[in-house]
Image: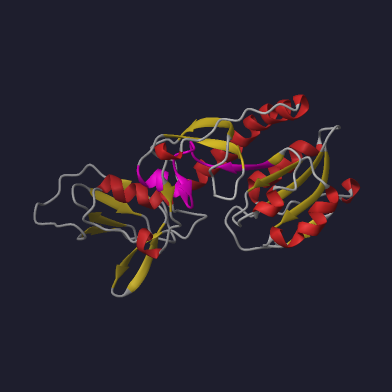
Amino acid sequence: MKLIIIGGLTNGKILIDYFLKKKNISIELIITYPIHYNIPRYKNLNISDKYQIPVVYDLDANKYFDLISKIKPDLIFVVGWSGMISQKIINLSKIGCIGFHPSKLPKDRGRSVIAWQIEEGKNRTSYTSFFMKKEPDTGDIIVQQNFKIEKNDYINAVLDKVDYALEKMLPKIYTMMRKKKFVRIKQNLKLGNYRKVRNDKNSLINWTKSAQDIYNKIRAISRPYPGAFYIKNNIKVKVWKSKILNLKINTNFIAGDVIKIYKNGNKVFMTNDKPILIYSNNNEKK
């Protein structure tokens, strides 16, 4: 079976390494991000010369229609890839084009979905494989691998769980490939929702929110992402880690007040309901 893989990041590496070990699988082409591309969870796919697999380093996979057309792939996999894949490319695969999305589709289609789920305090989600269509994240579902989001998980830990979910999912997909029979569950898009990409406005801490809301926002976009922030004296202060405190507080404090400053730079702020410890950029331990 001839495969083309479009992708990168840590999950792209997992998928490629898995199929390199399968004797009845031939990876005919890999399209991936430019070397040293500055993106969270970047992973150099580092394909050994012994495999003799052509690798294209480009942000636009759609430019390679003619090359993909000549290969006549049985399957195209798209994983860890932020660009759109044209319907023309999707149609070149005999079986289909399989994509992956970190939510329980049809819920949370679109962009920045892990961050949105963490910020809203969701404790369960899925990694979903599906047959791609022109409209993002709307195709028939193949496998959904469920996993938990613990209340103290920061986004990097959740991304690790996404990678592990992919590892558990791939043998199921491979079994379908060998049998040439795939599960196809049509999505009911009326039951889902669509997420927009996050921006600075979504990252600004609002101290009038509850301590839990602020804590969730901070862990949702912590490293390797841009980070939540607050403005102090016209300076943007990034926040990577926090802790909700159960302290008796003078009722004179209002949301946004600094209750305490530690010698190492850590600060305790008042929120709408409870104080929250904000770790400084240079020292994340009190």
Residue 142 appears at what percent x and percent y? 61, 32
Residue 101 magenta-highlighted: yes
Identify which residue is drawn at 41% across, 44% down.
193
Identify which residue is drawn at 48% across, 45% down.
109
Residue 60 appears at what percent x and percent y? 68, 62
Side of 189 relative to 36 (left or right)? left
- One can see residue 264 in this view: no
Residue 281 appears at what percent x and percent y? 42, 61
Identify which residue is drawn at 26% across, 48% down.
211
Camera-side residue of 136 and 255: 136
Camera-side residue of 285 and 207: 207
Identify which residue is drawn at 70% across, 59% down.
62
Side of 67 relative to 171 (left or right)? right
Residue 72 appears at what percent x and percent y? 82, 46
Residue 148 magenta-highlighted: no
- Give the magenta range: 97-120
Camera-side residue of 213 and 15: 15
Camera-side residue of 266 and 57: 57
* Image quadrant where one finds the N terminus: top right
Side of 32 relative to 100 (left or right)? right
Q: State the residue lying farthest toward the left.
A: 252
Count of picture labels: 0
